[in-house]
Amino acid sequence: MLKEIEVYVNRLYQHAAGNKKEIKELKDEMRSHLMEAVHELKQEGKSEQEAVHLAIERFGGEAELQLVIGQLFQAQRIFAKRVLYTAIFFLIASLLTVFIIWVDELGNNNENRAIADRISDLLGTQSSITADQQEHIKQLAQSAGQIASIKVYKLDKVERSNGESSDFNPEGAIPDYQYDTSVPIFEWMDYYYSLDQEWFIHIKSRHFAGVFDAVLVGGLTAYIVLFTIWAIINAYHHRRLNTGWIIVFTLFNAVGYIAYHLIRRKARLNAAS
Protein backbone atom coordinates (compact mmCIF):
# COMPACT_ATOMS: atom_id res chain seq x y z
CA MET A 1 0.00 0.00 0.00
CA LEU A 2 2.66 2.49 1.02
CA LYS A 3 4.71 1.80 -2.08
CA GLU A 4 1.80 2.44 -4.46
CA ILE A 5 0.88 5.67 -2.70
CA GLU A 6 4.54 6.74 -2.69
CA VAL A 7 4.84 6.11 -6.44
CA TYR A 8 1.62 8.06 -7.10
CA VAL A 9 2.71 11.07 -5.01
CA ASN A 10 6.19 11.12 -6.55
CA ARG A 11 4.73 11.06 -10.07
CA LEU A 12 2.52 14.04 -9.24
CA TYR A 13 5.45 16.16 -8.10
CA GLN A 14 8.14 14.92 -10.48
CA HIS A 15 7.95 18.08 -12.63
CA ALA A 16 7.28 20.55 -9.81
CA ALA A 17 9.87 23.34 -9.79
CA GLY A 18 10.06 25.18 -6.51
CA ASN A 19 11.34 25.14 -2.98
CA LYS A 20 12.35 21.54 -2.17
CA LYS A 21 11.34 21.85 1.45
CA GLU A 22 7.91 23.17 0.47
CA ILE A 23 7.47 20.38 -2.11
CA LYS A 24 8.40 17.79 0.51
CA GLU A 25 5.86 19.25 2.96
CA LEU A 26 3.14 19.15 0.30
CA LYS A 27 4.03 15.57 -0.60
CA ASP A 28 3.92 14.54 3.07
CA GLU A 29 0.54 16.21 3.49
CA MET A 30 -0.88 14.51 0.39
CA ARG A 31 0.55 11.16 1.49
CA SER A 32 -1.09 11.58 4.90
CA HIS A 33 -4.50 12.38 3.36
CA LEU A 34 -4.30 9.33 1.11
CA MET A 35 -3.37 7.07 4.02
CA GLU A 36 -6.34 8.37 6.03
CA ALA A 37 -8.66 7.77 3.07
CA VAL A 38 -7.34 4.22 2.65
CA HIS A 39 -7.83 3.52 6.35
CA GLU A 40 -11.45 4.73 6.24
CA LEU A 41 -12.20 2.65 3.14
CA LYS A 42 -10.72 -0.46 4.74
CA GLN A 43 -13.00 0.09 7.74
CA GLU A 44 -15.92 0.11 5.30
CA GLY A 45 -14.93 -3.40 4.23
CA LYS A 46 -12.79 -2.69 1.19
CA SER A 47 -9.65 -4.67 0.57
CA GLU A 48 -6.36 -2.85 0.83
CA GLN A 49 -5.85 -2.85 -2.95
CA GLU A 50 -9.39 -1.57 -3.56
CA ALA A 51 -9.00 1.05 -0.84
CA VAL A 52 -5.78 2.36 -2.39
CA HIS A 53 -7.29 2.56 -5.88
CA LEU A 54 -10.45 4.27 -4.62
CA ALA A 55 -8.50 6.75 -2.49
CA ILE A 56 -6.32 7.74 -5.43
CA GLU A 57 -9.33 7.95 -7.73
CA ARG A 58 -11.23 10.17 -5.30
CA PHE A 59 -8.19 12.37 -4.79
CA GLY A 60 -8.18 13.27 -8.46
CA GLY A 61 -6.80 12.29 -11.81
CA GLU A 62 -3.04 12.26 -12.08
CA ALA A 63 -2.85 14.51 -15.13
CA GLU A 64 -5.24 17.04 -13.62
CA LEU A 65 -3.34 17.18 -10.33
CA GLN A 66 0.00 17.53 -12.09
CA LEU A 67 -1.43 20.50 -13.96
CA VAL A 68 -2.69 22.10 -10.73
CA ILE A 69 0.65 21.55 -8.98
CA GLY A 70 2.54 22.97 -11.94
CA GLN A 71 0.28 26.00 -12.01
CA LEU A 72 0.78 26.51 -8.27
CA PHE A 73 4.56 26.71 -8.51
CA GLN A 74 4.37 28.65 -11.76
CA ALA A 75 2.16 31.22 -10.02
CA GLN A 76 4.77 31.56 -7.28
CA ARG A 77 7.52 32.19 -9.82
CA ILE A 78 5.38 34.69 -11.72
CA PHE A 79 4.52 36.51 -8.50
CA ALA A 80 8.20 36.77 -7.54
CA LYS A 81 9.11 38.09 -11.01
CA ARG A 82 6.32 40.67 -10.91
CA VAL A 83 7.50 41.87 -7.51
CA LEU A 84 11.03 42.29 -8.90
CA TYR A 85 9.85 44.01 -12.09
CA THR A 86 7.64 46.38 -10.09
CA ALA A 87 10.57 47.22 -7.80
CA ILE A 88 12.79 47.98 -10.81
CA PHE A 89 9.99 50.08 -12.36
CA PHE A 90 9.71 52.24 -9.22
CA LEU A 91 13.49 52.67 -9.10
CA ILE A 92 13.83 53.68 -12.76
CA ALA A 93 10.67 55.83 -12.78
CA SER A 94 11.66 57.75 -9.64
CA LEU A 95 15.25 58.33 -10.78
CA LEU A 96 14.11 59.38 -14.26
CA THR A 97 11.50 61.77 -12.84
CA VAL A 98 14.02 63.26 -10.41
CA PHE A 99 16.52 63.72 -13.25
CA ILE A 100 13.89 65.49 -15.40
CA ILE A 101 12.97 67.78 -12.49
CA TRP A 102 16.64 68.53 -11.81
CA VAL A 103 17.30 69.41 -15.47
CA ASP A 104 14.18 71.62 -15.50
CA GLU A 105 15.26 73.38 -12.29
CA LEU A 106 18.75 73.95 -13.68
CA GLY A 107 17.28 75.40 -16.87
CA ASN A 108 14.95 77.67 -14.86
CA ASN A 109 17.84 78.94 -12.73
CA ASN A 110 19.89 79.77 -15.81
CA GLU A 111 16.94 81.46 -17.51
CA ASN A 112 16.14 83.53 -14.41
CA ARG A 113 19.74 84.75 -14.29
CA ALA A 114 19.70 85.56 -18.01
CA ILE A 115 16.47 87.57 -17.59
CA ALA A 116 17.95 89.47 -14.65
CA ASP A 117 21.03 90.25 -16.78
CA ARG A 118 18.84 91.55 -19.60
CA ILE A 119 16.82 93.73 -17.24
CA SER A 120 20.00 95.13 -15.70
CA ASP A 121 21.43 95.88 -19.16
CA LEU A 122 18.10 97.39 -20.25
CA LEU A 123 17.88 99.83 -17.34
CA GLY A 124 21.57 100.68 -17.12
CA THR A 125 22.29 103.70 -14.91
CA GLN A 126 19.06 105.58 -15.49
CA SER A 127 17.03 106.68 -12.48
CA SER A 128 13.56 105.55 -13.59
CA ILE A 129 11.85 102.92 -15.70
CA THR A 130 10.07 104.05 -18.85
CA ALA A 131 6.80 102.60 -20.15
CA ASP A 132 8.64 100.89 -23.02
CA GLN A 133 11.07 99.31 -20.58
CA GLN A 134 8.19 98.14 -18.38
CA GLU A 135 6.61 96.49 -21.41
CA HIS A 136 9.91 94.84 -22.27
CA ILE A 137 10.27 93.45 -18.73
CA LYS A 138 6.69 92.21 -18.91
CA GLN A 139 7.45 90.35 -22.14
CA LEU A 140 10.55 88.79 -20.58
CA ALA A 141 8.46 87.53 -17.65
CA GLN A 142 5.78 86.14 -19.96
CA SER A 143 8.35 84.37 -22.12
CA ALA A 144 9.51 82.31 -19.13
CA GLY A 145 6.95 79.73 -18.06
CA GLN A 146 8.32 79.42 -14.53
CA ILE A 147 8.25 83.06 -13.38
CA ALA A 148 5.43 84.15 -11.07
CA SER A 149 6.55 87.74 -10.54
CA ILE A 150 9.34 90.24 -11.20
CA LYS A 151 10.03 93.22 -8.94
CA VAL A 152 12.61 95.88 -9.76
CA TYR A 153 13.91 98.27 -7.08
CA LYS A 154 16.37 101.10 -7.02
CA LEU A 155 19.34 99.70 -5.17
CA ASP A 156 19.31 102.36 -2.45
CA LYS A 157 15.74 101.32 -1.47
CA VAL A 158 16.79 97.83 -0.41
CA GLU A 159 20.39 98.36 0.69
CA ARG A 160 20.95 97.86 4.40
CA SER A 161 24.29 98.95 5.82
CA ASN A 162 25.87 96.95 8.64
CA GLY A 163 28.98 98.94 9.41
CA GLU A 164 31.72 97.67 7.15
CA SER A 165 29.41 95.59 4.94
CA SER A 166 26.04 95.94 3.25
CA ASP A 167 23.27 93.55 2.39
CA PHE A 168 20.00 93.85 0.51
CA ASN A 169 16.51 93.29 1.87
CA PRO A 170 13.47 94.24 -0.24
CA GLU A 171 11.01 93.56 2.60
CA GLY A 172 8.85 96.63 3.15
CA ALA A 173 10.29 98.46 0.14
CA ILE A 174 8.03 99.57 -2.72
CA PRO A 175 9.29 98.33 -6.10
CA ASP A 176 9.82 100.79 -8.92
CA TYR A 177 8.17 98.24 -11.18
CA GLN A 178 6.34 94.99 -10.51
CA TYR A 179 4.77 92.48 -12.85
CA ASP A 180 2.85 89.41 -11.69
CA THR A 181 2.17 86.64 -14.19
CA SER A 182 -0.71 84.14 -14.17
CA VAL A 183 1.63 81.15 -13.87
CA PRO A 184 0.08 78.57 -11.48
CA ILE A 185 2.56 78.13 -8.69
CA PHE A 186 2.35 75.87 -5.64
CA GLU A 187 5.93 76.15 -4.44
CA TRP A 188 8.38 78.86 -5.31
CA MET A 189 11.88 80.17 -4.72
CA ASP A 190 13.00 83.78 -4.49
CA TYR A 191 15.96 84.85 -6.61
CA TYR A 192 17.70 88.14 -5.83
CA TYR A 193 20.09 89.87 -8.19
CA SER A 194 22.23 92.95 -7.65
CA LEU A 195 24.16 93.10 -10.90
CA ASP A 196 25.14 96.78 -10.93
CA GLN A 197 25.15 99.86 -8.71
CA GLU A 198 21.66 101.04 -9.67
CA TRP A 199 19.07 98.26 -9.66
CA PHE A 200 18.00 95.32 -7.50
CA ILE A 201 15.91 92.58 -9.13
CA HIS A 202 13.67 90.10 -7.30
CA ILE A 203 12.30 87.14 -9.30
CA LYS A 204 9.82 84.70 -7.79
CA SER A 205 10.11 81.43 -9.70
CA ARG A 206 8.33 78.10 -9.65
CA HIS A 207 10.25 75.48 -7.71
CA PHE A 208 9.87 71.71 -7.42
CA ALA A 209 11.84 70.89 -4.27
CA GLY A 210 8.80 69.34 -2.57
CA VAL A 211 7.92 67.25 -5.62
CA PHE A 212 11.58 66.28 -6.02
CA ASP A 213 11.78 65.02 -2.43
CA ALA A 214 8.41 63.24 -2.57
CA VAL A 215 9.21 61.41 -5.81
CA LEU A 216 12.72 60.44 -4.70
CA VAL A 217 11.75 59.25 -1.21
CA GLY A 218 8.51 57.59 -2.34
CA GLY A 219 10.06 55.83 -5.33
CA LEU A 220 13.12 54.59 -3.48
CA THR A 221 11.03 53.41 -0.53
CA ALA A 222 8.75 51.42 -2.84
CA TYR A 223 11.78 49.93 -4.60
CA ILE A 224 13.53 48.96 -1.35
CA VAL A 225 10.41 47.33 0.11
CA LEU A 226 9.56 45.38 -3.05
CA PHE A 227 13.15 44.30 -3.73
CA THR A 228 13.46 43.12 -0.13
CA ILE A 229 10.26 41.08 -0.52
CA TRP A 230 11.60 39.54 -3.74
CA ALA A 231 14.94 38.69 -2.12
CA ILE A 232 13.16 37.09 0.85
CA ILE A 233 10.97 34.99 -1.49
CA ASN A 234 14.04 33.80 -3.39
CA ALA A 235 15.97 32.95 -0.24
CA TYR A 236 12.93 31.03 1.02
CA HIS A 237 12.74 28.98 -2.18
CA HIS A 238 16.47 28.28 -1.89
CA ARG A 239 15.92 27.02 1.68
CA ARG A 240 18.38 29.60 3.02
CA LEU A 241 16.04 32.15 4.56
CA ASN A 242 16.80 33.19 8.12
CA THR A 243 16.59 36.31 10.26
CA GLY A 244 20.13 37.31 9.35
CA TRP A 245 19.45 37.37 5.62
CA ILE A 246 16.19 39.29 6.14
CA ILE A 247 18.17 41.98 8.00
CA VAL A 248 20.87 42.00 5.30
CA PHE A 249 18.30 42.37 2.49
CA THR A 250 16.50 45.16 4.37
CA LEU A 251 19.62 47.17 5.20
CA PHE A 252 21.77 46.58 2.11
CA ASN A 253 19.18 45.77 -0.55
CA ALA A 254 20.78 44.80 -3.88
CA VAL A 255 24.28 44.71 -2.36
CA GLY A 256 22.99 42.33 0.31
CA TYR A 257 21.40 40.10 -2.32
CA ILE A 258 24.62 40.00 -4.34
CA ALA A 259 26.46 38.89 -1.19
CA TYR A 260 23.78 36.24 -0.61
CA HIS A 261 24.09 35.02 -4.21
CA LEU A 262 27.89 34.77 -3.99
CA ILE A 263 27.78 32.89 -0.69
CA ARG A 264 25.10 30.52 -2.03
CA ARG A 265 27.12 29.94 -5.20
CA LYS A 266 30.25 29.17 -3.17
CA ALA A 267 28.30 26.73 -0.99
CA ARG A 268 26.96 24.93 -4.08
CA LEU A 269 30.46 24.66 -5.59
CA ASN A 270 31.83 23.29 -2.33
CA ALA A 271 29.01 20.76 -2.16
CA ALA A 272 29.68 19.64 -5.74
CA SER A 273 33.42 19.19 -5.21
Image (tube, helix red, strand yellow):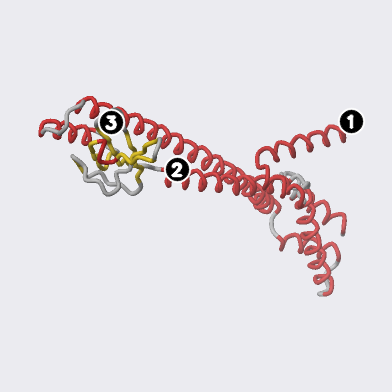
Dot placed on the residue nearer the N-terminal end, 1 or 3: 3
- Tag 3 secondary structure: helix
Q: Which residue is drawn at 58% across and 46% down?
A: 83
Dot placed on the residue nearer the N-terminal end, 1 or 2: 2
Q: Which residue is drawn at 79% across and 51% down?
A: 21
The residue furthest right is: 273
The CA span between labels 2 and 3 is 26 Å
Q: Which residue is drawn at 69% across and 45% down?
A: 249
Disc 3 marks a residue whose amino acid type is Ala
Q: Name the residue under label 2.
A: 212
Residue 160 lies in what quarter of the image? top left
Q: Can residue 16 be seen in this view?
A: no
Q: Name the residue under label 1.
A: 273
Which of 101/242 is in front? 101
Q: Position of residue 134 (x, y in %)?
A: 15, 34
- Tag 2 secondary structure: helix
Which of 138/106 is in front? 138
